Amino acid sequence: MNKFYLIKHPDLFQGEKYLKSDKNYFEGWYFKTSNSNETISFIPGINVDGNKKAFVQVITNDSSYFIDYDIKDFDFKFDPFFIRIGKNTFSKDKVHIDINENIKGDIEYSNSQNINSNIISPNIMGPFSYVPFMECNHAILCMKNVANGVIKINNHNINFNNDNGYIEKDWGYSFPKSYIWCQGNSFKNSNASFMLSIADIPFKVFDFRGIICVLIVENTEFRFTTYNNTKLLKYDISKDFFDIILQKGEYSLNVKSQNYISHRLSAPVKGKMEKYIFESVSSLISITLKKNNDVIFSDSSTNCGLEIVQK
């Protein structure tokens, strides 16, 4: 598959060549779905660290699970995007889960909304999407969609009826050593969707703090990123809280988080899924967007995904 085609279509499996080598690598997709009270996220992926494995991670309000699979249980298609791990299948239109009798079900997605893209910014990483030596690549595949279905977790059904979905992915060989990440599209007073990540990025001979952030309100996109000269004016974080302010030109964005119960997930270090991070899918974020000194958006979202990883 042509590498420029893959850059333009980051949802597709990027790591086919690593299935034929022992070079360290990981690739994982993130499917998050929320109703008014509960959230469930599925993380299907592969990792290569001499051995080759596939996995599915599951996180809910109450618990998390890591299920190992043989790499032979992993399959993919390019057109349209589709992956299979064991009996589980994932696409931008549907998730089918059949891990065991205790974790199974289906979710269908429609009315997908994504960020703006062009040849310079094929996805949220902008021109960094073309840099071949990034330790970790990130892509937003769907900022918001309409979700319908039901997932059974240990005799409890999580039902979705015209609720909210979100899809993103990461690939490379290691997660950043420290970062914050949050995502929410269950706002109280609006139909907004939001994603933020601030990470310490190694870049050959130096490191820098990379920013990727998107707020979509009434089909208008506000993007704050390193490559569009966004400044980080405030960065106050602790293990379960952050308060940040971003500024780009005449716009400023204040984001505050309130963490709830977090659960353990496995993250890659040089291809090995040996680092433990903790994610909540039931956090609260509050956002205030200003143009000059005028507030043009202020709202809060429940059912938020939140990770705070400190050095």
Image (cartoon, grey):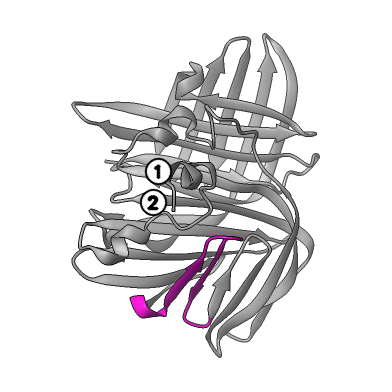
Helix or strand or loop: what does disc 1 sit on?
Answer: strand
- Percent x, y for residue 140? 56, 45
Q: Which mark is residue 137?
A: 1
The reply, left or right, for residue 182 in relation to residue 250 is left
Q: Which mark is residue 171?
A: 2
For label 2, the crowd category at 10 Å Cα-Cα, with few meaning under 14, some 14 to 19 and many 20 or more, is many
- Viewer-side residue, 22 vs 115: 22
Q: Residue at x 43, y 40 (%)?
A: 180
Which contiguous range is marked in magenta?
A: 69-87
- Percent x, y for residue 27? 39, 57
Number of dots carrying numbers: 2
Q: Is residue 170 magenta?
A: no
Q: Which mark is residue 210?
A: none
Q: CA distance from mark 1 to mark 2?
A: 5 Å
Circles 1 and 2, Cβ within 8 Å, touching? The answer is yes
Q: Quadrant of residue 164?
A: bottom right
- Viewer-side residue, 262 vs 64: 64
Query: Label 1 is placed on what type of residue?
Result: Asn
Helix or strand or loop: what does disc 2 sit on?
Answer: strand
Q: Is residue 276 visible?
A: no
